Amino acid sequence: MIRRVFLTVALILSSTGCDRGDVARPFAESRTPPDLSARFFMPEAWAWGYLQVGNNPPQRYGVASTWRAPRATILILPDTGECAEAWFETATELTLRSYSVWVLDRAAECGSGRQSSPRDRIHVRSFDPDVAAVKSLLRIVIRPNGETPVILLGQGQGAMLALRAVETGLTVDGLVLSSPTGAMPPKWTPWSRSGQDLFQRGRTHDPQRGHVTQSWMTANPDLRGSGPSPEWLKAAALFVETARNSARGLDHATLILTPGPAPSQDLELCGAINTCAIVPVSGAYPALNLEADTWRKPWLDAIIRFIAGKSDAARRVGPDRFAPALPLVPGPVSEDLRPGDVQTGTGPDGGP
């Protein structure tokens, strides 16, 4: 327990030292919107940190754990335009079930650093840094101990990122792809308080959950993102095509959750993976994590059953994939990293 408290404090302190006026700088410690219901507040003992791979802008991540040994570790990759804050409700529910939850903001989005102006435009030319950040966060920061199963959960475009990370060598105990088939986001226009939220765009039936991201962005200008650049859209189309075409023979237990009847693309994807189950959530809209309870509950129940199965299997089999290691405490972001370097910080005793 003592080590966990130290880790939490160190993460918070490291996140406050960045200059939010710089376009390329990351942002954490977001202000809670005054119009937000308490169920959407930050989970208890939530902490922020940064991860930088090479000379790419740092990416923000958050973590919440339990006061007991976690039964599983879950790394969440949000959809495009969706900040870690949109997952606070889900993270709280999962930690109450004794799971450790990590959420990684996408490159050039939300609390992650930006490398172009205006700040509310999502701009990358390649998704390779995103993939590298997922791998680095798991291998260098989270550092699984070999006894607790690791689940990678991606939503929307984040599902494609999760799939590609595993295809290119990341080892996890379970892969959850939520709404992997979805429309590309609309191209960038300046962010507006009166802009359409996910409920108004028909992505969820729930007006409160559909407005969560807009609320956080209204209260925190540094989180704002209102659409991608043409370069992002081009890179995303190629990335999704590559991820789907490379899935055949993938040897990771996979759960695919789809809104409504399963699209043919997702049925084909599941069929290409050696061990895969597909669960349609009948009548749901694509933002399954922010859907009304009628559809969100079966979505969350399916995920929990999947994780519980991996947790039970781990208890029977024991550690077999990762060597035990202490977690790292992220430090200030370095300005001098070379391509291929990874910056996260040092351990509690000053060493790795």
Image (cartoon, rainbow, N blue to C red):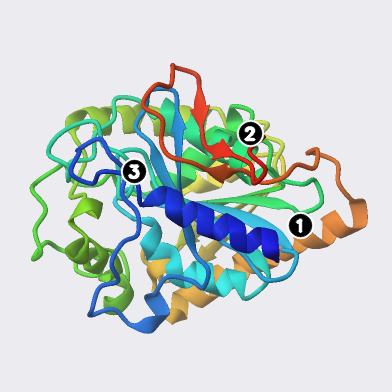
- 188 horizontally vs 338: left or right: left
**Callout 3, which amino acid?**
Ser
Alpha-carbon distance for marks 3 and 2? 22 Å
The quarter holding residue 187 reads top left
Q: Which residue corresponds to the image point at 63% horizontal and 34% vertical from the top-left? A: 170
Q: Quadrant of residue 6?
A: bottom right
The image quarter in which residue 306 lies:
bottom right
Residue that mark 3 sits on: 112
* Nearer to us: label 3 or label 2: 3
Q: Does residue 232 appear anywhere in the picture? A: yes
Please tell me whether mark 3 sits on a helix, a strand or a loop: loop
The residue where tag 1 is placed is: 310
Judged left or right of residue 145, residue 164 is left
Q: Does residue 275 sit above or below 243 in this rendering?
A: below
Residue 332 locus on image (x, y percent):
43, 39
Amino acid at the residue labelled 2: Leu
Residue at 49%, 35% (x, y): give it: 133
Give the mark, 3 or 2, whose residue is nearer the N terminus: 3
Where 335 sits versus 76, above or below?
above
Please state, as top left, top right, bottom left or bottom right, where the C terminus lies in the image: top right
**Residue 114 image point, x, y percent:** 26, 37
- Label 1 environment density (alpha carbons within 10 Å; few <14, some 14–19, many ≥20): many
Mark number displayed over residue 170: 2
Q: Nearer the viewer, residue 204 or 62?
A: 62
**Residue 191: mark in rendering:** none
| Inter-mark Cα distance, 1 to 3 | 31 Å
Number of other residues with Cα within 10 Å of mark 3, as a class: few under 14, some 14 to 19, many 20 or more: many
Image location (x, y in percent) of residue 172: 68, 43
Q: Quadrant of the N terminus?
A: bottom right
The residue drawn where x is 59% and y is 69% is 94
At label 1, the amino acid type is Lys
